[in-house]
Image (cartoon, grey):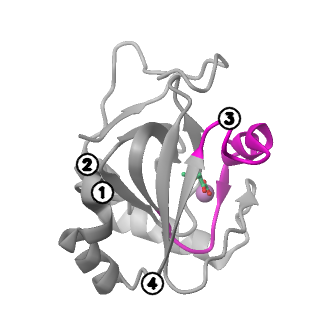
Amino acid sequence: ALEAWYMDSSDEDQRKPHRLRPHQPVSLDELKKLGVFHWRLDADHFDSDPELRKIREERGYSYMDIITIQKDTLPNYEEKLKMFYEEHLHLDDEIRYILDGQAYFDVRDKEDRWIRISMSKGDLITLPAGIYHRFTLDETNYTKAMRLFVGEPVWKAYNRPADDFEIRQKVQRTVQDRA
Ligand code: KMT
Ligand code: NI
């Protein structure tokens, strides 16, 4: 299942877990308050899974593609991983479904602390538009992920600081209202 925790602030290899000592877990409920939602699905049958079909229909996720993040299969691998780990936001939700392997998504909580979300095969997550986040592989250096989008995908990322977007106020309000 999905696991999340507050991160330490060491500069060590980003692929390491970076758990605090003592470990400070973050529950799915706390993630929901940040607008982060999670489903656990059957990744072995993703192309015929009625549960995935239902989620896509209900939420309008018309677009999907599959990205394999691995040294020998992803063009400009190092460059892309570096980009993914820069703290950034998007003007649309980021929706990712791990089909194989594992990876970390880090999101900022309302006090601006990093939460590390450990995603493995079968985990689908939605990060709300405007939330500051970043992505990294873990020490296994491999994941295959489905990227979903409402309509035509926009991959544009705005690195922090990007606080002038109206969406940032919406994010702050959501977090306050749910606190
Ligand atoms: C993003 O914008 O953070 C990403 O696309 C992360 C990599 S996709 C598994
Ligand atoms: Ni992103």
Secondary element type, mark 2: helix
The quadrant in which the C terminus is found is: bottom left
Q: Is residue 165 left or right of residue 68?
A: right
Which segment did they paint magenta?
69-95
* Of pointers 1 and 2, the one earlier in the residue sequence: 2
* Of pointers 2 and 4, the one earlier in the residue sequence: 2
- Identify the residue position indicated by label 3 in the image: 71
Residue ID at (60%, 69%) = 168
> Distance of mark 1 from mark 3, alpha carbons?
27 Å
Q: Do the residues labelled 1 and 2 touch (CB within 8 Å)?
A: yes
Secondary element type, mark 4: loop
| Number of the front mark, 1 or 3 | 3
On residue 62, the disc is 4
Query: Up-down: is 24 above or below 179?
Result: above
- Identify the residue position indicated by label 2 in the image: 28
Could you classify mark 2 by the number of other residues whose Cα lies within 10 Å: few (under 14), some (14-19), or many (20 or more)?
some
Could you classify mark 3 by the number of other residues whose Cα lies within 10 Å: few (under 14), some (14-19), or many (20 or more)?
few
The residue under label 3 is which amino acid type?
Lys
On residue 38, the disc is 1
Is residue 158 or residue 68 the one in the foreground?
A: 68
* Of pointers 3 and 2, the one earlier in the residue sequence: 2
Residue ID at (49%, 82%) = 150
